[in-house]
Amino acid sequence: MYEGVKAYPACGNETLEHEAVTWYPVMRLGYQPFDSSLQARADQILAVDRVDPPGTHFRGFARRVPNPGPGDGIGTLVVWADGVARWISDSGKLDVWMINDEITYTWVC
């Protein structure tokens, strides 16, 4: 678990670089995957029982991409040995599942 990790994955296609690993967003907590082609990988991620990081809480998400507010652009990155990570903003507004397998996104934010 790494605290103080800068990111702002609001659109779903922003990668996160941390300790020489690139993390690719798959889905936000409580939502479908960013792209339907990622559904099988999302199902695999959710099939594993993972403990929530201490102090995390789900607050929901805006439907549009707002400018980052206080605590939105920095958060906690939890990394599991199976190539899955979860980044949660300090504000609790962004909670994103990521993988270290390269994903090519078909949209621009």
Image: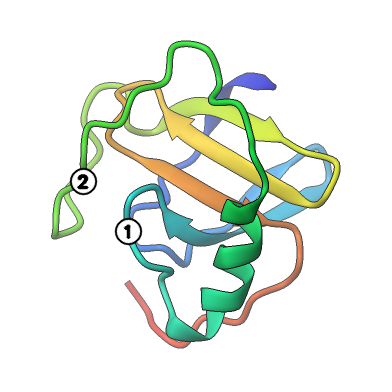
Left or right of 84: which side holds 75? Answer: left
Binning the other alpha carbons within 10 Å of mark 2 as few (below 14), some (14 to 19) or many (20 upward) gives some
Q: Nearer the viewer, residue 12 or 47?
A: 47
Question: What's the residue at 37%, 79% (across, down)?
Answer: 108
Mark 1: give few (<14), some (14-19) or many (20+) Cα within 10 Å.
few
Q: Mark 2 points at which residue?
A: 61
| Res 2 label | none
1 or 2: tag closer to the N-terminus: 1
Say which quadrant the C terminus sits in. bottom left
User: Which secondary structure lies at badge 1?
Assistant: loop
Q: Distance between the residues labelled 1 and 2?
A: 9 Å
Residue located 64% across and 75% down the image: 103
Tell me residue 86's x, y (percent): 57, 40
Three-letter code, disc 2:
Phe
Res. 43 image quadrant: bottom right
Determine whether the residue tagged by mark 2 lies in a helix, strand or loop. Answer: loop
Q: Where is residue 107 in the image (x, y as percent from the top left)?
A: 39, 83
> Residue at point 39% right, 47% down?
29
Which mark, residue 31? 1
Decide if residue 35 is on the left or right side of residue 77.
left
The answer to which image quadrant residue 60 occupies is top left
Q: Residue furthest top?
A: 55
Callout in the foreground (1, 2): 1
| Up/down of 17 relative to 49, above or below | below
Residue 6 vs residue 63, the one in the foreground: 63
Q: Where is residue 91 in the image (x, y as percent from the top left)?
A: 30, 23
- Considering only vertical position in the picture, is 69 above or below 65? above
Quarter occupied by the N terminus: top right
Residue 73, percent across and down? 39, 33
On screen, residue 47 versus residue 89, left or right, reads right
Dot 1 and dot 2 residues touching (CB under 8 Å): yes
Looking at the rendered structure, the kind of residue marked 1 is: Tyr
